[in-house]
Image (cartoon, coloured by chain):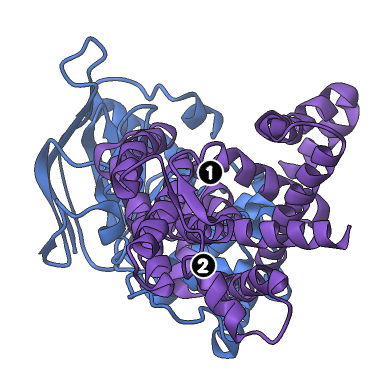
Chain colours: A blue, B purple
Amino acid sequence: MLELTDICKAFDKNTINEKVALDHVSLSLESGDFVTLVGSNGAGKSTLLNAVAGMFLLDYGRIMLDGSDITHLSEHQRAAYIGRVFQDPLTGTAPQMTVEENLVMAWKRGQRRRLRKAICLQERSFFREQLATLGLGLEERLTTKVGLLSGGQRQALTLLMATLRKPQLLLLDEHIASLDPHTADLVMDLTCRIVKEQQLTAVMVTHNLEQALAAGTRTVMMHEGRVVLDIRGAERKCMNVLDLMQLFEENSGTTLNSDRVLLAQ
Amino acid sequence: MLYALAGTLEQGLLFALMVLGVYLTFRVLDYADLTVDGSFTTGGAIAASIIFAGGSPWLATAAAVVGGLFAGMFTGLLHTVFKITPLLSGILTMTALYSVNLRILGRANVPLLRADTVITKFNSWLPLDSIYGATLLGLLIVVLVVAGLYLFLKTEVGLALQATGDNEQMIRAQGVNTNHMKLLGLAISNGLVAFSGALVAQNQQFADAGMGIGMIVAGLASVIIGEAIFGRRTILQQIIAVVCGSVIYRAVLALVLRLGLAPTDFKLLTALIVVAALASPQVRNWLGKGRTAERSGLDA
């Protein structure tokens, strides 16, 4: 499904600030895998996601998605196959445009955009139906500007936009980290439901170890640009947060140094 | 007095096309495009030299629009291919166009006295008094352009263009090549600006190399005035507001002229209007800190 082979990326290369963000990472996802990606600060989790999304080109390595090589495709070309939700709820939606306009732009992801009236009655009722599944009452606010919605509503909308047209891969970059606890739970439940219903292949970055084990089907841990742990199935099922931390220490030779990981306990 | 009002309306409508172009880049695309000063003259120069050489004024006007499209695309290519900042890429094109415009004109100015222009042609079809010809033609063209621009912005491509100005990261994640959108927006914008330049040159019956100087600031002033008076809630409201802003801006200039200022003071006045509009949020901030703090709290 998704096949990362030996990918490398360094920032500020050949300067005193050189930072190796991805150090020969190889990772292979099966169709239907829901990977939770954890690791300490600066481990390269978000960089890995951004590499797959095409926000920069790699120094080395190859990315295959569903059998085709996407290593050299630009960000907007890859968007045809990949749905994304970002950490900042403001990133995924256009604030000056209405809810239905945002949805129709997402509905055209990977499609040819034409000189045709974008929103007709048919689209409108489809969007209303889809918004109703979020349970936030957004189906009554189709013509509201997105900038007037709350962060949680915007993030739920972004999630819907990312999956409105089924993506081959869903990338979630700490997408509930900046929401209040109640809204975070709500968006997390929505995420799990949508991934399950559409049988999506997904990668979710999180700093919450408990959540990393509770959600998804597989947990990958990174440290200093490398994958240090990859657990799934029965092994993962009977594991708790302490086991995970201990395993991490064994494999990386250090303790988890993320404040947020510790605070999330 | 009525005659003065009609003159203001005529000017406002002919310049409204330029203002719509500025609106498209400045507001919709969020791109401060300074090409305008050059491409306005390019439009006037192309139209005037074709008409002067005996060509059809309709064809001349169409050629002017095409010239503007290319000017905008050039700015867009500087920005998207070579990553030159929006401000600088516009300035570079504007500077380059100054020479190009002189080449097109062949000299500092081209007179069109007694030549056939789109306005004299239009007048010859009218049963009315010919002094309102330019106003009517301007109104007709502005209505068509406003409708066209509105319908375009509501198409699938138009929404992608709007989103490019609103949240570039978002629309790229939805599979849109934002570089293409910027090129398209800049091309359409400068096409409109050159269209305006062509009509203004034909109406004043000459084109000269300096006719576009300060045009961008006049455009910004019109956009800001229009939005301040008529609001900017929806796209259609905004587009119409901007056209009205163009007329009001010309009216303000006419008024100031009557109060005894010299026409050469116009640019200073225009700059002051834009400064006042751009500075007002900050001034309001100084005056009522508590209230604005509360408001920005709501926004977040």
For the residue carrying disc 2, how many other residues have a C-alpha within 10 Å: few (<14), some (14-19), or many (20+)?
A: many
Direction from residue A171 to residue B141 in the image, left or right: right
**Residue hosting label 1:** A88
Residue B5, image quadrant: bottom right
Q: Is residue A137 above or below residue B46?
A: below
Q: Is residue A128 above or below residue A78?
A: below
| Residue at point 77%, 32% (across, down) | B281
Direction from residue B72 to residue B263 in the image, left or right: right
**Residue with the most extreme front position:** B114
Please check whether the numbered discs 2 and 1 fall on a single chain: yes
Give how far across and how far down residue B23 sits, in percent: 58, 53
Label 2 residue SS: helix
Direction from residue B29 to residue B86 in the image, left or right: left
Say which of B119 and B143 sits in front: B119
**Residue with the most extreme bottom position:** A122
Residue B231 visible to an observer of this rendering: yes
Residue A214 visible to an observer of this rendering: no
Q: Is residue A19 above or below residue A99?
A: above
| Residue at point 35%, 44% (across, down) | B101
Residue B1, image quadrant: bottom right
Give how far across and how far down residue B161 sits, in percent: 46, 61
Label 1 residue SS: loop
Q: Mark 1 — on which chain does it sit?
A: A
**Residue hosting label 2:** A160
For the residue carrying disc 1, how many other residues have a C-alpha within 10 Å: few (<14), some (14-19), or many (20+)?
A: some
Which quadrant is the C terminus of chain B positioned in?
top right
Tell me, for residue B229, which label it has, or none.
none
Q: CA distance from mark 2 to mark 1?
A: 16 Å
> Which three-letter amino acid code belongs to the residue tagged 1?
Asp
